[in-house]
Image (spheres, grey):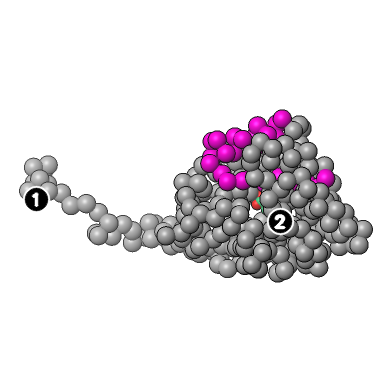
């Protein structure tokens, strides 16, 4: 029987050099399949804006949408460590907002931790949420909520100057009390320096194999998300194509009366049909 990991287990995995494998999920079924596959952690990412709602980015995503999807994920994966992703404007305006919204994730969706984007500038929020008794994961590198400032969905930390800035942000995030850090779209060498510098686990999405674990977006892993494919994505399946094929066959079967077959229909109770005539 699977045992739900705690932040202490995740810390121990770093110390022992055991990699954590985690994935995003936004619904009951993928969460349940991920749990059955032995995933270590699930992120209910605000990437749900693009993967579920078809927005162009994550900016329109609301707290209510994140809570709603986190509840479903919790029902699907009751024995998995779940991280709720704080959407745009749920923590940037004030520390009070940040604590209240982090608390909503815990009270209404039963998550184990929350994640928020940014470096030094969000450290007051990380400290306040941690002081409120909750676990915070930091997120630096490519941060989709501020992709406008970053010039789009672009790799970060590719020069010594910007890499140094990331390393300083990582240290500040640990100092503020975060229990772990996610590094996105950063050269592997820079992520390794961050991972070797910090005591807390440092995870990668597009930041190389040396991190303490890897995160992938479930719609990318399954080959469902079709708008674009970042360089760091490995598609393990092509469910998009398989789904179109299945739907096409259904449409053709229906139009050509190959569906439903006799085995898909209900029989009348013997003798009852005659009474209708
Ligand atoms: O929302 C999300 O899924 C994320 C990943 C892109 C890291 O934050």
Q: Identify the residue under disc 2.
A: 200
What is the x, y in percent for residue 205?
Answer: 70, 60
Whether label 1 touches label 2, CB < 8 Å: no
Queried whether the magenta region covers residue 148, the answer comes back as: no
**Residue 209 can be seen, yes or no:** yes
Ligand 1 within 8 angstroms of badge 2 C-beta: no
Q: Position of 241 compared to 61: left or right?
A: left
Q: Identify the residue under disc 1.
A: 270
What type of secondary structure mainly makes up the magenta span?
helix
Please, what secondary structure does the residue beneath circle 2 have? loop
Q: Residues within 10 Å of mark 2 (few under 14, many from 20)?
A: many
Closer to us: 66 or 224:
66
**Residue 185 can be seen, yes or no:** no
Q: Position of 143 compared to 41: left or right?
A: right
User: Looking at the image, which residue is at 59% across and 38% down?
Assistant: 105
Q: Quadrant of the N terminus?
A: bottom left
User: Looking at the image, which residue is at 61% across and 35% down?
Assistant: 103
Give the magenta part as a residue range: 96-120
Q: Quadrant of the C terminus?
A: top left
Queried whether the magenta region covers residue 104, the answer comes back as: yes
Q: Residues within 10 Å of mark 1 (few under 14, many from 20)?
A: few
User: Looking at the image, which residue is at 48% across and 53% down?
Assistant: 79
Q: Quadrant of residue 227?
A: bottom right
Closer to us: 207 or 52:
207
In this rendering, is residue 1 above or below 124?
A: below
């Amino acid at each position: 029987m699977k045992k739900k990991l705690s932040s202490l287990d995740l810390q121990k995995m770093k110390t022992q050099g055991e990699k954590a494998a985690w994935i995003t999920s936004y619904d009951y079924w993928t969460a349940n399949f991920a749990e059955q596959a032995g995933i270590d952690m699930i992120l209910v990412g605000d990437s749900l804006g693009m993967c579920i709602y078809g927005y162009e980015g994550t900016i329109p995503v609301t707290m209510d949408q994140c809570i709603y999807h986190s509840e479903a994920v919790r029902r699907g994966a009751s024995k998995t460590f779940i991280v709720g992703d704080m959407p745009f404007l749920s923590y940037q305006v004030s520390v009070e907002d940040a604590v209240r919204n982090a608390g909503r994730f815990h009270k209404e969706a039963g998550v184990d931790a929350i994640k928020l984007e940014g470096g030094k500038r969000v450290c007051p929020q990380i400290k306040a949420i941690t002081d409120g008794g909750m676990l915070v994961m930091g997120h630096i590198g490519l941060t989709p909520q501020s992709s406008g400032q970053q010039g789009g969905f672009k790799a970060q930390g590719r020069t010594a100057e910007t890499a140094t800035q990331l390393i300083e942000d990582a240290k500040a995030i640990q100092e503020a009390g975060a229990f772990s850090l996610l590094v996105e779209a950063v050269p592997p060498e820079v992520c390794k320096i961050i991972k070797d510098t910090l005591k807390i686990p440092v995870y990668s999405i597009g930041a190389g194999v040396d991190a303490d674990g890897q995160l992938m977006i479930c719609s990318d892993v399954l080959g469902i998300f079709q708008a674009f494919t970042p360089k760091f994505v490995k598609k393990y399946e092509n469910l998009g194509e398989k789904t179109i094929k299945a739907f096409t066959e259904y449409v053709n079967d229906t139009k050509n009366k190959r569906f439903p077959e006799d085995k898909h229909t209900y029989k009348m109770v013997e003798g009852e049909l005659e009474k209708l005539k």
